[in-house]
Amino acid sequence: KKPPVRVAITGAAGQIGYSLIFRIASGEMLGPNQPVILHLIDLPFAMAALNGVVMEIQDCAFPLVKGIVATDNQAIGFKNVDYALLVGAKPRGPGMERGDLLKDNGKIFTETGKYINEHASRDIKVVVVGNPCNTNCLILANQIKDIPKENFTAMTRLDHNRAQHQLADKLGVHTTDIRRIAIFGNHSPTMVPYIDQMTAKNHKASVDQQWVSQTFIPTVQQRGAEIIKARKLSSAASAGNAAMNHITTWVNGTAEGDFTSMAIPSDGSYGVPKGLIFSFPVAVKNGKYSIVQGLPISHFYQGLLDKTIKELVDERNAVDHLLK
Ligand code: NAI
């Protein structure tokens, strides 16, 4: 067996944390030969609840868990951490403007960035899950001086997985038969599920354009709200699952010829302003992702891309003072 790696989860006492931590502990994210030390981080008021989670982890007697650090102190929480899943964030309260949400979370992610820069492994891989995740990641990465910027990403894998299910259902195949699709843009209702290169069972597959624009895209964009309506709680299990998928793919790679979706610092590809944290189709090999270039962008998709780019530029402008 390999030496243990340290995996930090913020918001560890929350809903997503509860669905995520036990699966990481069982080896689902990093494989059955990779022992882990869990770093569970939450706010002071949540420490009693977090202690309950710790007792449950202990009572699972997981063979792969070699240690647990449960803390509200980020200097301890991020010490030598190899992977961080940043779930903790301030939720949007009733009557709260998007600008206020950006500001409150901006403070959280500025602080976390400082701690990660100072204490974490220089090879740390980070996925931001807490919303607004793209811009939170932008703010976080701005604090990083000594770790490569490409190690800071945000999660659109849930949107990707949702799209995969809708398409598999429509075409009467299994989700794993659907390949070469991706989410472009912001993790928000402006996200762009791109399917013009889709294959099903390794053959080019298409669906009618009216279904795409009137049913498929709105369904994927509004799936989160639909689940809240049904469950009276947000989609924690599928979000936790997607966060794990994001890291697993980043470590193990994508299949030859296939790609996945990750929100990453833009290098200017597809006309996306440099530096925005933007979801792209990426291929992953040997722990490094690269943007899949040259996918044809139709007039229809360009219109959608322009909207999601504009939204992310507006978000960046709203937090400009935090990016100095
Ligand atoms: P939750 O409210 O159940 O848990 C959040 C936890 O984070 C709480 O325990 C809270 O104390 C903690 N927390 C808040 N600020 C913190 C900080 N500064 N440091 C450490 N911990 C902190 O919420 P849930 O359902 O687990 O969702 C968490 C976040 O994930 C939300 O922002 C939600 O919008 C986001 N989300 C993102 C998705 C995506 O696709 N990117 C999908 C679903 C949810």
Image (tube, rainbow, N blue to C red):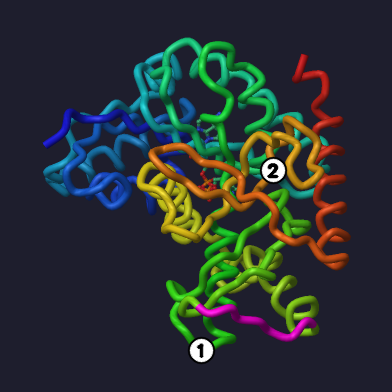
- Looking at the rendered structure, the secondary structure element under dot 2 is strand
Q: Residues within 10 Å of mark 1 (few under 14, many from 20)?
A: few
Q: Is residue 15 visible?
A: no
- Looking at the rendered structure, the secondary structure element under dot 1 is loop
Q: Nearer the viewer, residue 220 or 179?
A: 179
- Up the image or down, 177 lies above or below 284; here it is below
Image point 70% across, 27% down: which residue? 106
Residue most extreme to the bottom? 172
Decide if residue 63 is on the left or right side of residue 170: left
Residue 40 in the image, given as x and y percentages of width and height:
36, 32
- Up the image or down, 15 lies above or below 312; here it is below
Residue tagged by mark 2?
278
Image point 70% across, 67% down: which residue? 222
Q: Residues within 10 Å of mark 2 (few under 14, many from 20)?
A: many
Disc 2 residue type (three-letter): Phe
Circles 2 and 1: CB atoms closer than 8 Å:
no
Q: Which residues are magenta?
A: 203-209
First in sequence: mark 2 vs mark 1 = 1
Residue 187 in the image, given as x and y percentages of width and height:
68, 51
Q: Say which quarter of the image contains residue 232.
A: bottom right
Residue 199 in the image, given as x and y percentages of width and height:
55, 74
Image point 80% across, 32% down: which residue? 316
Image point 57% across, 20% down: which residue? 113
In the rendered structure, find residue 205 and report the number of the disc placed on it: none
Disc 1 residue type (three-letter): Gly
Does 207 appear in magenta?
yes
Q: Nearer the viewer, residue 307 or 136?
A: 307
Q: Is residue 90 visible?
A: yes
Residue tagged by mark 1?
172
